[in-house]
Amino acid sequence: MANHKWGVISEIKPMEETQEHSMGGSTDVGDVSWVVPTIRMGATVAPTGTPWHSWAVVASVGMSIGHKGMGYASKALAMTMVDLYQNETLRNEIKAEFKQKKGDYVYKGIVPDGPPPLKSGY
């Protein structure tokens, strides 16, 4: 592992090719990613080798390393949105790739049609 500084991977890795299936981790974006193109990124918020789902990660996220990681992540997300907003060609390429990879598949959520789970006004 190259370019460590105080136990943290500090290199910016190049963009990866679109994968058919993501490797590891989980998010709440699963259903959305079948309907619109999505972008996934990772940001360092804990020292290298820290076991996920542990008190050590919770402590790191609440300290300066986590705050700095989220600051960098926020900037990266904002710059990505500016790039997408300003570059119509890039947006069209993303849409075309999504359409090509999705093909004729029509996504149907597993929650059945029906009334909303809560009445309006709550």
Image (cartoon, rainbow, N blue to C red):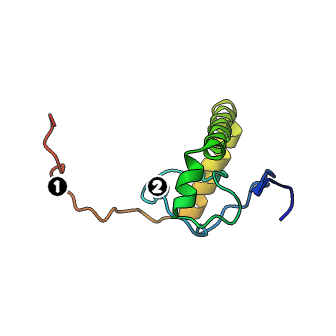
Q: Residue at x 30, y 65 (%)?
A: 110
Q: Residue furthest right?
A: 2
**Label 2, on which residue?**
29
Question: On the picture, is 104 further left or further right than 108?
Answer: right
Tally of numbered discs: 2
Q: Residue at x 52, y 60 (%)?
A: 55
**Label 1, on which residue?**
114
Say above or below: 55 vs 116: below
Q: Residue at x 58, y 56 (%)?
A: 98
What is the x, y in percent for residue 22?
A: 59, 67
Nearer to us in this view, 95 or 3 = 3
What is the x, y in percent for residue 30?
A: 45, 60
Quarter in which the N terminus is drawn: bottom right
Please indicate, yes or no, whether residue 28 appears anywhere in the rendered image.
yes
- Of the two numbered discs 1 and 2 on the same chain, state the one appearing first in sequence: 2
Say above or below: 113 vs 66: below
Calculate the distance from the C-alpha at mark 1 to the C-alpha at mark 2: 22 Å
Q: Secondary structure at mark 1?
A: loop
Please indicate, yes or no, whether residue 38 appears anywhere in the rendered image.
no
Quarter in which the C terminus is drawn: top left
Of tags 1 and 2, the one toward the viewer is 2
User: Which amino acid does the dot numbered 2 rest on?
Assistant: Val
Nearer to us in this view, 49 or 94 = 49
Residue 41, numbered circle: none
What is the x, y in percent for residue 62?
A: 55, 45
Q: Residue at x 55, y 52 (%)?
A: 59
